[in-house]
Image: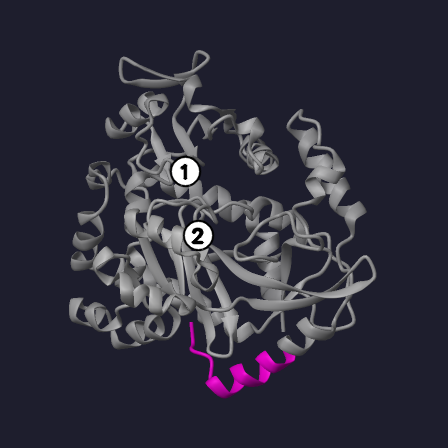
Amino acid sequence: MQDVPQENQRTTKTHADQLNRQCYCITLDRKALTDSLQKQFSDTGNEAPATPEIHHFFSNTPVFVPQADIATMERIVQAIESAAELPSYRERALSWAPDIAGFDPGPIGAFMGYDFHLGENGPQLIEINTNAGGAFLNTVLARAQHRCCDPSQQTAGTNRALDGFEDAVFAMFQQEWQRQGGDSTPGCLAIVDDTPESQFMFPEFQLAQQLFQARGIETLILDPSELEYVDGALSAHGKPIDMVYNRLVDFALEAPALGALRCAYLDGAAVVTPNPRAHALMADKRNLILLSDAQTLRDWGLSETEAGFLDRAVPKTRLVSASDEAELWSNRRKLFFKPVAGHGSKGVYRGEKLTRRVFEEILKGDYIAQNFVPAGERTLRVDGTVTTRKVDIRLYTYAGQLLLSAARVYQGQATNFRTPGGGFAPVFQV
């Protein structure tokens, strides 16, 4: 991929910012969205969730992003994945990972998610996730869009990505299967999460189930307690399970209820993706300490070009230590605190809003402190009132290649789906 000239990036970005401030168009065709969801759920034999509930996922308006920024984010992802291949990086990342991460069965992790804030200095990496949610829902959303006042709309490249999304997802899981030595495709796949029907993303599990079953793979949605591991075979309700699409947030498979899955994984009896090793190498928040240290990455063998991308894009990150209490408290307004083992927005704190009591708790726990990067903004009209919301951009990738880009619109210190006018939003490249 060619690098985008900085001057072009500034010109395009100004146009995107203007649209994000001034375009109030409602582009989401909610009838088309509902019809599409109901058709897909009926294809699985499931009823569509109640419309008000499912529609909380989605914003009415798109987020405009410069094509140059999308290209830059793709290059940042590729630089991160190159860094994660370095022997010294792997040694350091595995040094603080649980022992199970030392086992390498081959798969590299389906549906990587890279979250960015966009600002004057270009894309800034905020977080990396190994079980990034929302891709299936975002695909349905992106296909249910009206035109708006700006003629740009979805680019040809975006439309190609949407048209090829299902095939790309199927190919991704086939590759994960084959990376562990499997031939052809698995016979039965399980989508596994704790009490899945109670999960906020349960409709997405159903969409994934429909995709796999339409391509001949029997697919079950299971709680891990439904799994059994006997005589070297993983099964559920008498059916052999060849592959697990892992949506659990117990990334090391440590809970007692995960015993069957853990044993099958370590024995190589089932392909699990994403797996504990993928999380340890890519998504453990302590790895941001390494990725924000461009000079060390250069010393370890990362190319100057890729180190340069990370130097500009990864906010400086450090491990919180009680020995640095005075300095951290003094600089807290410039920092964002995240738990090492946290997932999503749980337990995160913007330093500007910290109380002394909460700060004392952070010092006792395992936390990182990341230089604070303001979120982008999107102005929209909610119930007739013009208001401003925050925005982040997520790239869904596999093996460093982009599958889909999407936005999340929210208010508060972290993304959520409770914001009026917020939720997932399509990315319109301009």
Which of the two labelled residues, at mark 2 and mark 1, occupies the earlier sequence position?
1
Write down the region rendered in magenta: 1-15
Of the pair 52 and 328, the residue shown nearer to us: 328
Q: Position of residue 339 (x, y in %)?
A: 36, 49
Q: Quadrant of residue 428?
A: bottom right
Residue at coordinates 77% horizontally, 40% vertically from top-left?
A: 35
Quadrant position of the C terminus in the picture:
bottom right
Of the pair 40 and 262, the residue shown nearer to us: 262
Mark 1, residue position = 249
Mark 2, residue position = 348
Residue at coordinates 39% horizontally, 30% vertically from top-left?
A: 243
Q: Position of residue 148 (x, y in %)?
A: 77, 67
Q: Is residue 240 visible?
A: no
- Horizontally, residue 136 falls left or right of residue 305, namely right
Q: Position of residue 415 (x, y in %)?
A: 55, 53
Q: Amino acid at mark 2?
A: Val
Q: Amino acid at mark 1?
A: Val
Q: Nearer the viewer, mark 2 or mark 1?
A: 2
- Horizontally, residue 111 falls left or right of residue 92, namely right
- Horizontally, residue 18 falls left or right of residue 230, namely right
- SS type, badge 1: loop
- SS type, badge 2: loop
> Real-space Cα distance between discs 2 and 1?
16 Å
How many numbered callouts? 2
